Amino acid sequence: MMEEKKWAELTPEEKREVRMKKWIEAEDVEFASTESKKAYQERATRLMKALMLQEPDRVPVQLPAGNYPAYYAGGSIHKVMYDYDELRRAWLKFLYDFDMDTYRGPNLVHSGKVLEIIDYKLYKWPGHGLAENVAGYQFIEGEYMMADEYDALIKDPSDFALRVLIPRHIGAFKPFKKLVRPASVMGLPIGFVAQATNPDVRAALQAMIDAGVEMEKWQEAVNACNKEAQAAGFPSMRGGMGVAPFDTLGDALRGTQGIILDMYRQPDKLHEAMDKVADITIDNALAMTDDATGIMVSFPLHKGDDTFMSDEQFETFYWPSLKKVILALIEEGLMVMCFAEGRYERRLEALSELPKGWTMWQFDQTDMANVKRVIGDVCCISGNVPSSLISKGTPQAVKERCRQLIETCGKGGGYILTGGAAVAETNPENLRAFMEAAKEYGTYK
């Protein structure tokens, strides 16, 4: 019997069955009512069937709301980044005012106070480097890892992260570069404590404590939203998040220019580093999902689209390490969702190599008829109502686009209706048009 087997003895399919059963039954959730529990299980079952390429009762919907709840509630991203009561109020107002099949909490609305305490270098955000009325973040790309530092990263990633990367990414932790290698204090733990005799190190540690106290307040608000959403009958598919190994190096370490040069000047080092990063990504994703109730790990893909690199470069540098991560998570019974930012017209054949019924792909600008033809019998597909249409179009135009996508992609199951990307500002009726279209045109039975 499956229940009598140890986890390591289960097949990937058996592990997924355990995870799905726990997710759908939600025995640990204190539902607001028996009706809420029934609605939760109906929604979760609908999503599960779509993910596994089966026909649910109708096409499920994931509203592309993004940070829109902040504006819908009369506020802004700046306001909810600094006022956690307002963050909670905004997301719960959205929850109760909109019909949806799956809920996205405010997990990615970072605390502005925490970012300021630690002097975070990788973002500009509303009120800090950007005007307060800006609706999102701006990533600050840079060369945070030098071209000659691959060997240090590969030899000891933890030490490199602690004493090199973190001091460059976070201003308050710059003194960490004065720390000794963690491995050097094995057997002599008092040496680790002795580092705190340096006042700069103590100041860095105090900044971490201060940021942790503030982050705990933020987490309370986020967790309260997520818990109430479950209690009201709305499941979340998210269990963890990761970054493709190439993107990890190309975003926050080498930068775009640096990694492009590395593909030509030191490809072997780049491959070795991506393989190391892939192992770390797998471990981190598994740790996150062990602590969560979700059944999926999500990956936003930043640099893999058709316009960034050639087909040969994608097949050589981008896809192998990402595929390694995906397959490792599948072995642990986890579904994988990849957000294919940009265009993936020429990448679809590679995606067809994946095991059937284990991945969900959200497409931004890729032709969905072609997506359905090439990978519709292998992967659950979603997207791509244009963000421009959701933001500036009419509800009738949004509903018509949804109808077209349902008719193109919904046949046989395996399709989730959503946008090409999330929006921050729109007409609320444009979001309601998604559910109207799904209920009117997306019924299977």
Image (tube, rainbow, N blue to C red):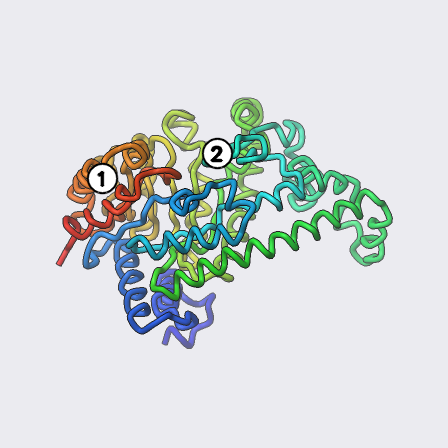
Mark 1: which amino acid? Pro
Q: How far apart are marks 2 and 1 (CA)?
A: 25 Å
Asked if disc 2 and disc 1 are in contact, CB closer than 8 Å, the reply is no
Q: Let me know if residue 308 appears in the view.
A: yes
Measuring from the top left, give residue 274's x and y in whole percent. 54, 38
Q: Is residue 179 left or right of residue 116?
A: right
User: Farthest residue in the left direction?
Assistant: 445
User: Farthest residue in the front direction?
Assistant: 74
Mark 2: which amino acid? Asn
Q: How crowded is mark 2: few (under 14 residues within 10 Å), some or many (20 or more)?
A: few
Task: Residue at 56% x, 48% y: name it.
Answer: 280
State whether residue 207 is above or below residue 349: below
State whether residue 5 is above or below residue 341: below
Quadrant (top left/top right/bottom left/bottom right) for the N terminus: bottom left
Which of the marked residues, 2 or 1, is nearer the chain's N terminus? 2
Measuring from the top left, give residue 381's x and y in whole percent. 28, 45
- Residue on which the image places disc 2: 133
Measuring from the top left, give residue 208's x and y in whole percent. 70, 49
State whether residue 257 is above or below residue 366: above
Work out whether residue 418 or residue 5 is closer to the camera in this orientation and state it. 418
- Residue on which the image places disc 1: 395
Q: What is the secondary structure assignment of the residue under circle 1?
A: helix
Give the image quarter of residue 307. top left
